Every structure is written in C-alpha cells, then in structure tokens.
Amino acid sequence: MSKIEKVLATGKTHTTASAAGITSRGHNGTLDINLSTPGSAKPAHVFAAAQPHPTAEQLFAGAWSACYTAAVGLVANDLNVVLPGDLSVDIEVDLGQGGKEYFLQARLTLRVPGLSHEVATRLAHTADQICPYSKATRGNIDVELNVLTA
C-alpha cells in the first residue's frame, strides 16, 4: 500500500451504543445519526443535525463505526463479557495524497473503560475480523486499531 504524505481532509465520528440504539456524532457536531440494525423495529437512520454537505470521509467513518460497534457487541456476547455503559468507538478517516495519487487511511479507537486491556484488545481485534467494513478495507488502506480502557 502507498502511504499518505499529505492529509487533505479528515472525517471523524464518535459512536456510542445504548439500549436505545447506536448514535454516531461528527467531531464538530455536524453529523448526528441514530442507526439501527437490519430487521430492527427501531427507527431507521435519522440525520438529526447534519449540515447540508457532510464529507464522504465523515459518512464513511460514521457507517464503519456503527458496524464496528455492533461487531464489538456480538463478540462480547460470545465471550460472555459485560460491556461498560460508556463504551464508544472513535473513527477518523483521512483523505490524502501520496505523490499525485489519492488514498484513504483510518484510525479506530475502541474505548471500554473498566475492562482489562487484554480482554479489550481481544474484543477489538475479533470485532475487526468480523466487521464487514473492516473486512472491506483490510489490505486496501492503512488502518490503525487502538484500545483504551481508562
């Protein structure tokens, strides 16, 4: 893969999961989406405070973080791990240039306060293996996966 030499734009989202569903927010408050899983009786996607033109990187980060958050929940269920109520996922997707070529790169941060770092790391990496967005980007763009437990 080629490396980004100059970042042109970054789409950032902060996604939380609760009993009411998954909510993804842009880093500057321009994108609030309430997301549901396929087959759920909960309302479909709602763009609550989106500016007229959120960036593609921000939309991609929001969709990816919602999918990844759901994957973390599935893995936790399989491993009988109780997730903290303040679990969140932050994803940043950069659009950049390497020479005259354009590329994407991403940083995912799973925040699971109170879990041991070992368990949290296992959750993060196993969720990364089953998340369709993570699968689609694997080998295609540089992705950094981080875990925070404090």
Image (spheres, rainbow, N blue to C red):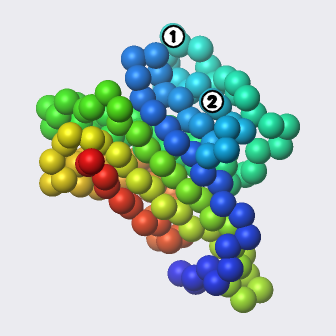
| Residue 10: quadrant of the picture | bottom right
For the point 35% across and 36% down, the residue is 87
Residue 69 spot, x, y in % from top left: 41, 39
For the point 25% across and 32% down, the residue is 83
Query: Element under label 2?
Result: strand
Residue 141 spot, x, y in % from top left: 54, 69
Left or right side of 79 for 58: right
For the point 31% across and 52% down, the residue is 148
Which residue matches tag 1?
41
Q: Residues within 10 Å of mark 2 (few under 14, many from 20)?
A: many
> Could you tell me if residue 14 is visible in this image?
yes
User: Of 41 and 91, which appears nearest the observer?
Assistant: 91
Q: Nearer the viewer, mark 1 or mark 2?
A: 2
Residue 39's place in the image compared with 101, above or below, is above
Q: Amino acid at mark 1?
A: Ala
Please identify the residue farthest to the top as the structure is shown: 41
Left or right side of 130 for 53: right
For the point 41% across and 53% down, the residue is 109
Q: Do the numbered discs 1 and 2 sit on residues whose CB atoms are within 8 Å?
A: no
Residue 2 spot, x, y in % from top left: 58, 83
